[in-house]
Amino acid sequence: MDQLDDILHQDLDPTETQEWIESLNAVISHDGTERAHYLLERMVDSTRRAGGYLPFDPTTEYINTISPNNEAKSPGDAALEWRIRTLIRWNAMAMVVRANRKPGELGGHIASFASSATLYDVGFNHFWRAPSAEHPGDLVFHQGHSSPGVYARSFLEGRLSEEQLDLFRMEVVGKGRGLSSYPHPWLMPDYWQVPTVSMGLGPIQAIYQAQFWKYLEHRGLIPKSDRKVWCFLGDGETDEPESLGAISLAGREGLDNLIFVINCNLQRLDGPVRGNGKIIQELEGVFRGAGWNAIKLIWGSYWDPLLARDSKGVLRKLMMETVDGEYQACKAFGGAYTREHFFNKYPETAALVANLSDDDIWRLNRGGHDPHKVYAAYHAAVNTKGMPTVILAKTVKGYGMGAAGESQNPTHQQKKLDAEAVRHFRDRFNIPVTDDKLADVPYFHPGKDSPEVQYMLERRRQLGGALPQRRRHAEVKLKAPELPAFEQITKGTGDREISTTMALVRGMNLMLRDKQIGERIVPIVADEARTFGMEGMFRQIGIYAPFGQKYRPQDADQLLYYREDQKGQVLQQGISEAGGMASWMAAATSYSISNQPMLPFFIYYSMFGFQRIGDLAWAAGDMRARGFLIGGTSGRTTLNGEGLQHEDGHSHLLSGSIPNVKSYDPTFSYEVAVILQDGTRRMLEEQEDVYYYITVMNENYSHPDLPQGVEEGIIKGMYLFKDAGKPKKGEPRVQLLGSGTILREVIAAAELLEKDFGVTADIWSVPSFSEVRREGFDAERWNRLHPEAEQRVPYVTGLLQGHQGPAIAATDYVREYADQIRAFMPDGMRYTVLGTDGYGRSDTRDHLRGFFEVDRYWIAHAALAALAKDGKVNAKDVARAIKTYKLDPEKPNPLTV
Ligand SMILES: Cc1ncc(C[n+]2csc(CCOP(=O)(O)OP(=O)(O)O)c2C)c(N)n1
Ligand SMILES: [Mg+2]
């Protein structure tokens, strides 16, 4: 290596070097840079063949990728666009400053948008198409905390009023007119399309959105088009694993419908992103390595003449040597500082700026603030074929904020500007607000007939309409299959034993055959299709592969071979739950983003679901995703051998915390059928903004027929599975509740109780404690608020009322899960909850259920203990149960071991 370094950095024969460079320059001037590139590649190739070791260098010089002579020229009116931008800057700043002068600490950000205003403006004015009859529309992921700038544009366009700007971050009093802190489709459903503010979620979603569009195109569900996903993110945001974790997928699949714009203002919240390095270089290497077209947009036009005169490359060398912390200091301290600490480092560079004043040096702009350069970069990006593009735009955090924030470490959180700072801002951008008004920081609108507004509106007209805008409903009307279509799984299995996972996969297969919705089903897996018995789908509907299958699969001679296909329907996302989830979100929002409703099923190990990708699941709720998440091989004791990291006993608590998620833990295949049918009806037919979480298990047992009239109960979350009838006089009675596989232990416990203790039991199947809880609290709240009206009876109260004895619930989840409905037990009904609190471990199902105290014996024992407390049996009976069932009273609490 040392020798190689020497060769690369010491010129053994400068004359020879010069001759080669001159030859190359001749090629460039006669035949262009592409020809030169070709020749160089050939030479590199020859050297390698001769045995030369030429290590890959992922980075290029610290200058713009697009040279000035290759820049596409903007057709826009630069002066007018500058005026518009200044007004947007002002109003965005005013919105935040005004919000923070009110009582209540509303917060907001000025500095981030200040750095990216030009990047957004050029997009809005020239590139981003709204959906229209002619075009399906682009999709823009905005940096979440730059939202004030987007609102400020909408204000000028007349889409938002002054009153609304004053309701920034005041959504409660705003009653639907308030403006969200960040992009939230839940709160502004006609405006924001995608939530982004949780760092990293925008980029990963953008990649899978782009992939999903190609998927829809290849499958013939949408026409091929040149629409693009544009994703804005911060340079600090790239530290999130989600930001960069999926970029190789975009490179591999050649997603040329994807453009990342990374706002490299060199700062994050606390300070510099890479004070001792250069974030743009680092990212260039990472993205190029992943197969992206990386466009560096570092220097603005004022640097062009300097670079043109840099014949010996000393300025370039200096640019490369200087670290980001130093670049930040230059912008913070101004022109004189920059001359002294930057240019004066070498006599050649000092000479380059000898004729420039300090103010001129100060004006040497960064690429991301130069609309001409930004236009050229965007133009190159949208015309790139066969690969995704990343634009690395260098900007100044807090641009225009002066001493109050420009390139200052704490600027990210600056939201209150004093009078002096506001005056500076006005003067810097020439805003027509007079001194006497300045104290109020008033919004400024030039009037709807002003040239500025007319220009903006005309630009948007040319691009299909206003943005952002969100479609609430797809135009396509779909009909969900009725329950009889699910007969295969509503009918009992007789002696055959199957798992709920198998029932679910059968249900999916039935839906895949449906004429209307079959093609809209999107099965998504993260390398676990075989785990869930879905490998039949590989052959039947194929695995999506954008370039088809280029090899003969190892199992080609098998019936169910690994079939990849450009029109494949299964999305195999590899071992990436975050990828699977982001992919699911793309499909689940396709009704809105592409006007094509789809019904995705993402099937994964439930342990690696909500707790691993919970923040995406939360964002999915926000963006009104519609689809099924399937927590496979769930249950702390049901997935028995896999142990602590696999056995899930709590995902239902996490899913239950997302307001528009409906969670179910079915026991029988007919329950799976009813939930699937109803979910499909609600999401596809009614277009409700809900999504479903269903846990399925891998324990095989036989399933009964769908009992008469229980459908509504299943959907509401609880129904009477076995009615013990009216109790005989003196006969102790209990109410047993359960879900998932543990309901079967409950059923077995009822038999033990009757046989061994003469206790009879009504048995309740509770496929959703979460739904029952929600309804209960809703009724309770309503009653409190309507004290004089006839009081509503919570659903579960109504069911249990009139039934005797204490209630005992057991599930394969932690106690909190079944405990959720405690508040709605009828007066006087004791409620005991068993659950699997504690770490899972490997063993047989029987052993685990004994260990976690949720098997039939522990349930029977708990029932007797409750009856004893109620005075219906004696303590002796409870002691007898402990003995008969061989329960160890000194056994440690499973929570603690
Ligand atoms: C997951 C997550 N963690 C932390 C934050 C808090 N946060 C908001 S903005 C920000 C700094 C962002 O820096 P950068 O990405 O460089 O964006 P800039 O504002 O500089 O454009 C942080 C840490 C967040 N929004 N999301
Ligand atoms: Mg930043």
Image (cartoon, rainbow, N blue to C red):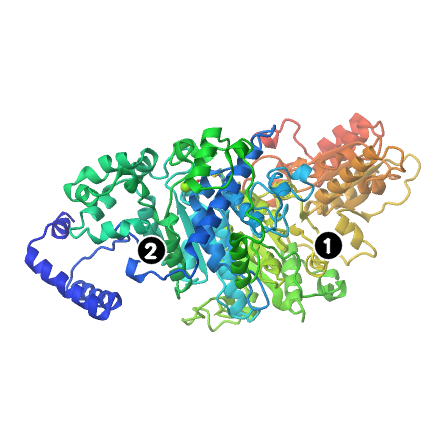
Cβ at disc 2 under 8 Å from ligand 1: no
Cβ at disc 1 under 8 Å from ligand 1: no
Residue 692 appearing in the image: yes
Asked if residue 484 is positioned above or below residue 763 in the image, the reply reads: below
> As drawn, which residue projects farthest toward the bottom?
557
| Amino acid type of the residue tagged 1 in the rendering | Glu
> As drawn, which residue projects farthest toward the right?
729
Q: Dot 2: few (<14), some (14–19), or many (≥20) neighbours within 10 Å?
A: some
- Residue under numbered circle 1: 671
Q: Residue at x 34, y 34 (%)?
A: 332
| Amino acid type of the residue tagged 2 in the rendering | Arg
In screen coordinates, is 340 left or right of 761?
A: left
Q: Earlier in the sequence, mark 2 or mark 1?
A: 2
Q: Dot 1: few (<14), some (14–19), or many (≥20) neighbours within 10 Å?
A: many
Q: Say which element carries label 2.
A: helix
Name the one closer to the observer, 548 or 645.
548
- Pinpoint residue 284: horizontal percent, then vertical percent: 33, 51
Name the one closer to the observer, 676 or 455.
455
- Pinpoint residue 199: horizontal percent, then vertical percent: 48, 43
- Pinpoint residue 102: horizontal percent, then vertical percent: 60, 30
Q: Quadrant of the C terminus?
A: top right
- Residue under numbered circle 2: 288
- Pinpoint residue 307: horizontal percent, then vertical percent: 23, 51
In screen coordinates, is 581 left or right of 884?
A: left
Asked if residue 130 is positioned above or below residue 320 in the image, the reply reads: below
Residue 595: quarter of image: bottom right
Residue 695 appearing in the image: no
Q: Nearer the viewer, mark 2 or mark 1?
A: 2
Q: Residue at x 46, y 55 (%)?
A: 123
